[in-house]
Amino acid sequence: MDAFQSRKDDVTLHLISWEDRWPQLVTGFSTRKEGFSQAPYSGLNCGLHVGDSIDTVIENRKKLAHLVGFPFDTWTCGEQVHGNQVKIVTEEEIGSGRISHKDAIKGIDGLLTDKKGVFLASFYADCVPVFFYARSKEVIGIAHAGWKGTTSRIVEQMLHTLEKNWGVLPQDVFAAIGPSIHECCYEVNNVVMDQVREVLGPDREKVIHMTSDDKGMLNLQETNRILLEKAGVLPDHIELSQLCTGCNTDLFFSHRKEGGKTGRMIAFIGLKEV
């Protein structure tokens, strides 16, 4: 059984173990089911930056906000530039990027906040979503980890920011790796593999399986899991989804499998206001 499962419908998948253990959390991942977008974005496209009708995407986002029970005006988004910069969301940033990609928090791929009632949103069509929860300080976070963000160690930046600003040690952090493209569908070249080899060292053999002299299949989920553990997150504090966006284009958008012209799912996490 996958870590991310449907509760009431096929539109959203929830991180059931977290939500059941900590009812104050809403956390999960959308699918492409339902929604108002037309081909090639057919379904619940939540990406404002992919060429779809802005009004349609906003309607999709509002539909999703209703389904998960978080007000749309609390949606807060980073620009997502495939980097490793992290932003602590304060009152001033709440709502950034919800109706315009230009208004998203600039240059940011990681978001953290201890504010209740804030919906952290990040967008995907194969890249790896990494969720964070520091229970002791009630801090939540989401990181967008494509291969560039992964090899620039965005998960370590998230953990460093948690420790520096809230005093939360890595061993006290819970993390989850959501649906994304898996090794079966993700062939990369030596430019990518060399950077993975550099950050993982001897562990590189666990995530790269060569298909030719200059290409190999990369397990980006496992790469992030290893980096989390190396940074001090306990193995039993890490959840890992087995759902592949490349294998399931009926359920998910896949940039690679759909030739680069497709929609975006959303990874979300929020703390309910009591």
Image (tube, helix red, strand yellow):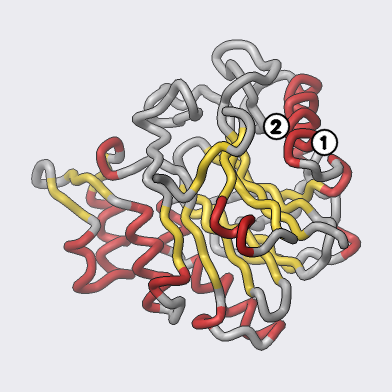
Of residues 92 and 6, which is closer to you in this image?
A: 6
At x 88%, y 44%, the residue is 73
Instruction: Inspect the image, locate mark 1, and give the three-letter code of the amino acid beneath it.
Output: Ile
Quadrant position of the C terminus in the picture: bottom right
At x 60%, y 38%, the residue is 7
Q: Where is residue 45 in the image (x, y as percent from the top left)?
A: 64, 26
User: Which secondary structure, mark 1?
Assistant: loop
Quadrant position of the N terminus in the picture: top left
Which residue bears the numbered disc 2?
Answer: 48
Q: Which residue lies furthest to the top in this view?
A: 39
Q: Position of residue 253 (x, y in %)?
A: 50, 28
Residue 106 seen in the figure: no
Instruction: Give the total number of marks visible in the rendering.
Output: 2
Whether residue 260 is situated above or below residue 160 in the rendered picture: above
Badge 2: few (under 14), some or many (20 or more) residues near its Cα, within 10 Å? many
Q: Is residue 273 rendered to the left or right of residue 48? A: right
Instruction: Inspect the image, locate mark 2, and give the three-letter code of the amino acid beneath it.
Output: Leu
Of residues 266 and 136, which is closer to you in this image?
A: 136
Q: Position of residue 181 (x, y in %)?
A: 38, 40
Which residue bears the numbered disc 1?
Answer: 99
Residue 93 seen in the figure: yes
